[in-house]
Amino acid sequence: MTGIEIHGDNTGAVAAGRGARATVHQAAPPPAEQAAALLALAELRRAIDRHTADLPDADLMTRAVARAGDEVRRDRPDPEAARDAIAAVTRRAGAVTAVLTAAAQAQALLTGLWPG
């Protein structure tokens, strides 16, 4: 047998053979999912604002949430940058449950926008 045979679900790029190249470009998320992610990010921002006294890096956390929102709004977003920004918020949240909960919800929605 010659050639390539692919079975199952293939959602990524595939390339084979000498000099073959495969590229995947992320597209902006569908409007409803984008709106849900932006609402979750807004709630995360409010949670940070409500607990600023308990968060030594609240300003850095707020900037990270803004970066994630910027990525969600882009025509060609960088999903990893958005998820990394929320991961940074989670790391800085300490034991502030309201912020941890809001960050987890935002992260879940971002992962849903761009699985993988």
Image (spheres, rainbow, N blue to C red):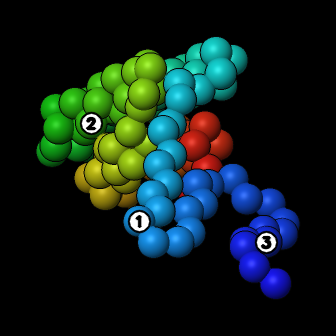
Q: Position of residue 39 (x, y in %)?
A: 55, 20
Q: According to the image, label 3 marks what residue?
A: 5
Q: Pointer 2: what residue?
A: 64
Residue at image coords 29%, 51%:
88
Q: x, y percentage for residue 66?
A: 30, 26
Which sits earlier in the primary sequence, circle 3 or circle 2? Answer: 3
Q: Give 41 or 31, whichever is nearer the viewer.
A: 31
Is 12 placed left or right of 85 in the picture? Answer: right
Q: Which residue is at the front of the view, 28 or 8? A: 8
Point out the frontmost of discs 2 and 1: 1
- C-alpha separation, residue under disc 3 versus residue under disc 2: 43 Å
Q: Position of residue 32 (x, y in %)?
A: 69, 17
What type is the residue that disc 2 sits on? Ala
Report the Cα–Cα distance between label 2 and label 1: 39 Å
Residue pictured at 40% horizontal, 21% vertical: 74
Q: Residues within 10 Å of mark 2 (few under 14, many from 20)?
A: many
Q: Residue furthest bottom?
A: 1
Say which amino acid is labelled 3: Glu
Q: Is residue 77 visible?
A: yes
Q: Percent x, y for residue 102?
A: 51, 39
Q: Image point 31% across, 57% down: which residue?
A: 91
Give the structural element (helix, strand or loop) at label 2: helix
Disc 1 and disc 3: Cα gap in Å?
A: 19 Å
Give the quarter of the image for residue 4.
bottom right
Tally of numbered discs: 3
Q: Residues within 10 Å of mark 3 (few under 14, many from 20)?
A: few
Q: The C terminus is located in which quarter?
A: bottom right
Determine which of the numbered discs, if any, sits on residue 19 in the image: 1
